[in-house]
Image (cartoon, helix red, strand yellow):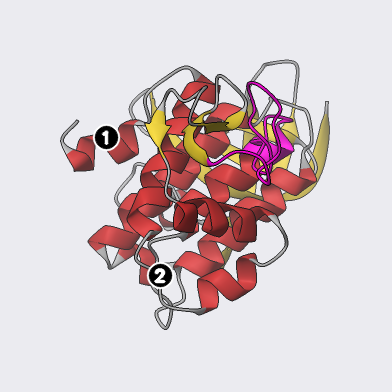
Amino acid sequence: MSLFRDQGVVLRTYRLGEADRIVVLVTEHHGKVRAVAKGVRRTASKFGARLEPLSHVALLLWQGRSELDIINQAEVIDHFKTIREDLDRVTKGFSLLEVADQLAQERHADKRLYDMLVGALRALSNVERDPLLVAPAFFMKCLVLEGAGPVLDVCASCGEPESAVELVAFDLTEGGALCRRCRRGRPISPEALALVRKILGGSLAEVLANPPPACAEEVAALATDAMEVHLDRRLRSVRSVAGL
């Protein structure tokens, strides 16, 4: 049994008893953590407002014998107010949380996932930038982190290079881009393929700094489908808004 400090992003919460709440976070040094915040559902509690989904917080926790830790202190690093006050941004923000929740492992630190999530939330909160590509870029970068990054320069099925065949489709179950002969999954335009390459090739900051190109919606749909294939489940935060 011991006290420990960490930073984390609140992924989701649910009720425990009459006044407590279980808070699920992805932390910098302890992976996914489930912890009890005592008394936070009481009207007079200021503690609870700091532990809402999307909040980036500094924590002092007590780890005992139970699977649930206890939150002793929580200080807000960033409440991401800009995201919360915009329906489009908050929907995209919750899709980031949903994916991080599925990928993070309990008690297993993954600093790259944590850093990517915090970076994506900061990008999403920037009102000077269009938020359209933030979540798709996060999904694609997470696939790479998971070892499931798509093949983009050759046909993922037959192995023919782009110089010899035209890449016209995309299917993550096949490994990525596919030529006309091997095509399955969803069609992909040359512009969308080029944009995915930029996102994964080190030019993400440039992509997010500029207005989304005409193929941005295509890439958003492709990235969502690819992440759902990898997770083997639908993304509720995306599909509920789309009505699918």
Q: Residues in magenta?
A: 143-166
Taking the spot 62% from the left edge, 54% from the top edge, the residue there is 197
Would residue 174 be seen by someone viewing this image from the given angle? yes
| Nearer the observer, 170 or 126 | 170
Would residue 47 be seen by someone viewing this image from the given angle? no
- The residue carrying pointer 2 sits among few (fewer than 14), some (14 to 19) or many (20 or more) residues within 10 Å by Cα, namely some
| Nearer the observer, 41 or 117 | 117
* Magenta region includes residue 165: yes
| Nearer the observer, 82 or 21 | 82
Q: Quadrant of residue 144?
A: top right
Disc 2 is placed on an element classified as loop
**Mark 1 belongs to which amino acid?**
Arg
Disc 1 is placed on an element classified as helix
User: In the picture shown, does residue 90 fall above or below 105?
Assistant: below
Taking the spot 54% from the left edge, 41% from the top edge, the residue there is 166
Residue position marked by numbered label 2 in the rendering: 212
**Mark 2 belongs to which amino acid?**
Pro
Residue position marked by numbered label 1 in the rendering: 239
How many numbered discs? 2
Image mark for residue 220: none
Extreme residue toward the left, this view:
243
Taking the spot 27% from the left edge, 34% from the top edge, the residue there is 239
35 left or right of 147? left
User: In the picture shown, does residue 175 fall above or below 49?
Assistant: above
Please tell me whether the stretch drawn in magenta is mainly helix, strand or loop: loop
